[in-house]
Amino acid sequence: MATCTATVPNLDTSGDNLYGPRICWQAFIDWAWDAFDFDKNDWDQGFGYHSVCDNQRPLSRTMSGVYCLTYSSPNFPRESYDSNILEWGCRFARNAIDELDARCGSGGTIARTQWGPFVNDWTQLYIPYWYGQGVSLRAGTLVHEARHADGRGHDSGNNDSTWDYNGAWRWQVCWLAWFAVDGQSTSTAMRTQARQRANNIINGNFDTHPGFNV
Amino acid sequence: MADSFDVVMPVVNAERTPTYWLISQALKLLNADGKSAELAYSHVVELLKERRDAVSGIFELLRSAPAEDIGRRWCALHIAGDVGDESAAKLLFREVLQPLPKRCGEKEGCEGPRDGELLVRTMAVEALQRVATHHEQARGLVLELIEQRPEQPVLIEAVKAAQALDLTDRVREILRKKDRWILDISIYPVEKVMAQSERSDDSPLGHAPPGTRALVSGPIANCCMPNKEG
């Protein structure tokens, strides 16, 4: 067991003052807790189980990412796989992620997912997930990890070889790109960061550059 | 066994001057939702353009932010670009060329500290481009960025910025032969950016989320009893 602390960054610029009040809604918390299989033992000890509306704590900041993933499509409550990933991203993520856990982490890593036969499947979130990323990027990371939880790893180190590989980087890019254009009830900063992060991934995380930006 | 955690609250700088107060308002409005916030942000930026100490105040905000506070640093650069004063150009140029952390190793997860820093560099490039829209000297700095050949994701942003400034011919002269493919990168409309879900709608819906509060048509039962003072 590790013990850790984090300095809380500005709550406006992280988006937690925008999304924090939205997640403080019992019907949503009950749903998200069950849909993403949070467990009390993974989220108490200061991570926020006893203060879910405290937007300085990891649980609230995770819930904000889940909220952004869930409600940003203009077509909500439709979640059809025939549409774009902004519409079905939450549906996919909640069905693919086996359990969502809070850990201290090390080395600046944001999140990890373990999956496969004969292992316990989990997705762990670490301190930089909550305190180094704004809310829209947290939602994008959930999409990325969900693709791993579905059994699709990277095929070239931490990169995907190509866009056609249809891996976690492509999915993250697509969700961020659609959020930047079509995301509902959000700020200029959240949209612009989403677009820029999508381009950073396109320009750095494919062995063969896809040939476009968004 | 799970880990344990606690938060540390940072020391908040007081809004010491009218300029600093305006900058803090810009920062809040940039992170607010809605058309009225966008309009108010543009008004605050116009007021900042009239203040001689705006750029120094914005870069004081940037320098005083802890390194881990990516959001505050990013917003400071965004505001600097919108204010568009020529005196910001050299500072933005230096910000772009700060070295990036190394990429995560394969066992260290997919995203890490480099990604936040890359976002900050990207914002610095876009801010420099906005300044360069109105100031010739800043256009030269965009070209100089390309000459310095930063790491690929930053180089691509710099090339895009130069192209947006109609400097494509100059960029072609500057770019190394092996980097000229960057000039052919297209900007796709989002409709062309699709993930293949490999699922049909016959797949499980799972536990469907509750409707948003906006979709709830009746009064909210557990909300907001007024206190005696009203």
Image (cartoon, rainbow, N blue to C red):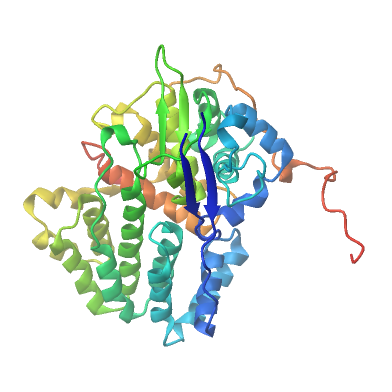
Residue B99, relative to residue B112: is it above or below? below
In this view, which residue lies farthest toward the left?
A: B177
Q: Where in the figure is residue B162, as x and y percent of width and height?
A: 24, 64
Image side of residue A188 versus residue B89, left or right: right
Q: Where in the figure is residue B137, as x and y percent of width and height?
A: 23, 78
Nearest the eye: A156 or A60: A60
Q: Where in the figure is residue B32, as x and y percent of width and height?
A: 58, 61
Q: Residue at x 35, y 59 (%)?
A: B120
Image side of residue B190 versus residue B89, left or right: right
Nearest the eye: B23 or B108: B108
Q: Tag count in the figure?
A: 0
Image side of residue A69 versus residue A54, left or right: left
- State whether residue B196 appears in this view: no
Q: Residue at x 33, y 77 (%)?
A: B88
Query: What is the quadrant of the C terminus of chain B in the image?
Result: bottom right
In this view, which residue lies farthest toward the right?
A: B228
Residue B61 figure quarter: bottom left
Residue A135, relative to residue B87: is it above or below? above
Q: Where in the figure is residue B146, as x and y percent of width and height?
A: 17, 62
- State whether residue B225 appears in this view: yes
